[in-house]
Image: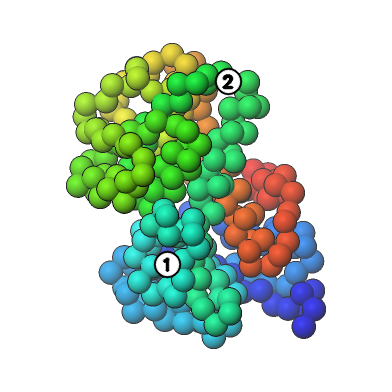
Amino acid sequence: MPLSTFNFQLGLIGYPLEYSLSPKIHTAALKACGLQGGYSLFPIHPDDKQGLKDLLNRVRTGEIQGLNVTIPHKQNVIEFIDELTPTAKAIGAVNTIYFRENKLVSGNTDAPGFLSDLKRFIENRKLGIGNQKSALVLGAGGSARAVVYALANDGWDVTLAARRIEQAEQLASSFSNYELRITSTFSLQLSTFNLLVNTTPLGATPNIDQSPLPENLLLPPNTLIYDLVYNPRETKLVKDAHSQGLQATTGTGMLIEQAALSFEIWTGHNLPRDILYKSVVE
């Protein structure tokens, strides 16, 4: 069947999902490629394992051609997957699911998506990082795993800060090839880092007045702030950073990059990023 007449059914697993921008991005992608189909939201409660299995079976049967995965399912879908890509296996978290050669496969486009957008952010603003690339990553969930993997492979020194220290320790132990440090969010020595990445959902719509950092905390000069939260367009963390004269960005660029990479896996189409970007900012 020609791709132009094939009906691509795609979607997103997570909870909650009502503020996701992914449907806009992938609807624009399908339209730009002249493909028929749709992108649906599948809110599945964290405790609903049967719901996950039932949805993934729809991928196995060909009813759904591709799924993205977001909080809180990036790790707990793995037990239902037949095969992980090497990147997803190394990270221990997934964000993309598809059916190939009679196997349900999961990959991770978050890591390359994040690193690509981070480099764009640094290069476009001509920000000098130098040789001392030191990053503080807030959070220790599935998104943090992708960020840590991307940064560590790019030569960054990485420190994890999480409210649940045991979760951070578990993450660090699964990346035994790298020297990861762990600290408490209540004892941050921010002056030792030139990049701060928030991978927690704090500050996301509708809780836009929240920030992962303490109120009125002064950040060191020249610290770069990257907040994976993309809705609202400017989070409290980013606003606070801007008010201190710092360079900061939300995760819209990463959202676009990971979506484009997932879309290419599902359909074979590699789209110009500006088409996808316009779908969420105009």
The dot on residue 43 is 1
> Horizontal placement of 267 versus 253: left or right?
right
Q: Position of residue 134 (x, y in %)?
A: 41, 26
Q: Is residue 55 above or below residue 185?
A: below
Q: Of 281 and 120, which appears nearest the observer? A: 120
Q: Horizontal placement of 115 versus 280: left or right?
A: left
Mark 1 neighbour density, 10 Å: few (under 14) some (14–19) many (20 or more): some
**Residue drawn at x 50%, y 48% as measured from the top left:** 111
Note whether residue 74 is visible. Answer: yes
Asked whether residue 237 is in view, the answer is no
Gap in angstroms between the C-alphas marked 1 and 2:
39 Å
Instruction: Name the residue carrying label 2.
Output: 127
Residue type at mark 2 is Leu
| Quadrant of image for the C terminus | top right
Q: Residue furthest front?
A: 177
**Within 10 Å of the Cα at label 2, are there few (<14), some (14-19), or many (20+) other Cα atoms?**
few
- Residue 133 located left or right of residue 101: left
Q: Secondary structure at mark 1?
A: strand
> Is the image coloured rainbow, by chain, by secondary structure, or in one colour?
rainbow
Residue found 47% across the figure and 33% down from its top: 155
Q: Is residue 123 above or below residue 73?
A: above
Residue in the picture at 66% in, 74% down: 8
In percent of width and height, residue 108 lies at 50, 57
Q: How many numbered circles does the render carry?
A: 2
